[in-house]
Amino acid sequence: MNITILVTGAAGYIGSHTCFELLDRGYNVVAVDNLVNGNREALQRVKEVTGNDIHFFKADLRDASTLERIFEEQPIDAVIHFAGYKAVGESVEDPLLYYSNNVSASVTLLSVMKEYDIYNIVFSSSCTVYGKPESVPVKETDSMAPTNPYGRSKLMVEEILRDSYKALPSLSVSILRYFNPIGAHPSGRIGEDPDGIPNNLLPYVSRVAAGQLEELKIFGDNYDTHDGTGVRDYIHVMDLARAHISALEELLNGSGSNCKTYNLGTGKGYSVLDVVKAFEQVSNREVPYKITDRRPGDIDKTFADPTKANKQLGWTAQKELKEMCQDMWYWQQQNPNGYSN
């Protein structure tokens, strides 16, 4: 196979795991990341585990001239677009940062792709585009009403992609709305490494179990769920990486242009306390927690209807919650200080 994929945001959590899956399946990878949230060490470890090289460029997608140089030098066949800021709270505090980085950068990327006749793109979207779901499980056809600038920035890029597809029939687009990625590569070499106190649940739980943080804060226990804590659809990051390859191959093997949207999740909902209990079982450690006030905008429960991806991409999430927690705990044990070990 001699197919080259440009991966933006390649040094981030999901990007690095997808780079592993691409290399493992014989694709060539050109990685672009500005390293604001990503870590170069993640890509170095991907190279070590797979035994394959990655062409890395430190670049900001808003820099059109640098992007043009990359497209000029590399024989790119398709793009997987992860790059973007992703913290909901930060997006509320600094919406212009999110619209500039997430939306403007995507416009620049699409413009350069058009200039160099690259017409296949897989876009990393989010279940936040739905906002508070009218019902669960959530279907791709459900109404979209994001409740924060992060979610709105993802929806804006979706709309830009749909408009571009209508204007440019040769363009093929796969929009992947995923729910809550957790876990790590089973090797323990790559995983999620947030700065400071994590925004996401499982790194937070993992650090409390390891004794690095005193206790877990659970935001609210009076939701309309089986135990009062919020319910989400948690999906193993390697299942998510496989889904990106399935979406990519649908584009590369397709008979013509298309623009499709898929939910990526397990179709199951787990509460915060479900996750805590599962993690305690696999780690054999207690995870002390404290109930605090709800966060503004948090919803009772949401989980995906992944039927469309199951049928059209031939993809199904394979890993259960226990395995997600096991892989995360192994990553934590092997890398107590993350990539800065």
Image: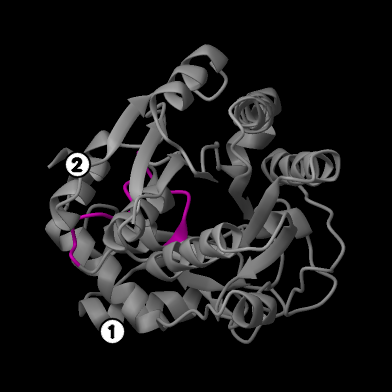
Check if mark 1's residue and mark 2's residue have beta carbons within 8 Å. no
Task: Give the answer, above or below, for where 11 lies relative to 324.
Answer: above
Percent of width and height locating residue 161 = 74, 43
The answer to which image quadrant residue 17 occupies is bottom left
Q: Is residue 193 visible?
A: yes
- Disc 1 residue type? Gln
Point 47% across, 55% down: residue: 200
Q: Quadrant of the N terminus?
A: bottom left
Quadrant of the snapshot with the C terminus: top left
Tell me the number on the disc at residue 281.
1
Calculate the distance from the C-alpha at mark 1 to the C-alpha at mark 2: 32 Å
- Residue at point 35% right, 44% down? 29
Q: For residue 81, say whether it is visible.
A: no
Q: Quick one: SS at disc 1?
A: helix
Query: Which is nearer the eye, 61 or 254?
Result: 254
Residue 221 pos. (x, y %) = 61, 72
Span highlighted in magenta in the image: 187-201
Q: What's the residue at 85%, 45% (across, down)?
A: 166
Q: Residues within 10 Å of mark 1 (few under 14, many from 20)?
A: some
Residue 59 on the magenta span: no
**Amino acid bearing label 2:** Gln
Q: Which mark is residue 177?
A: none
x and y percent of residue 231 in the render? 61, 74
Is disc 2 placed on a helix, strand or loop?
A: helix
Task: In the rendered view, tell whether residue 260 sits above or below residue 192.
Answer: below
Q: Answer left or right for 292 relative to 47.
A: right
Left or right: 315 as drawn, with respect to 196: right
For the stretch drawn in magenta, the main secondary structure is: loop
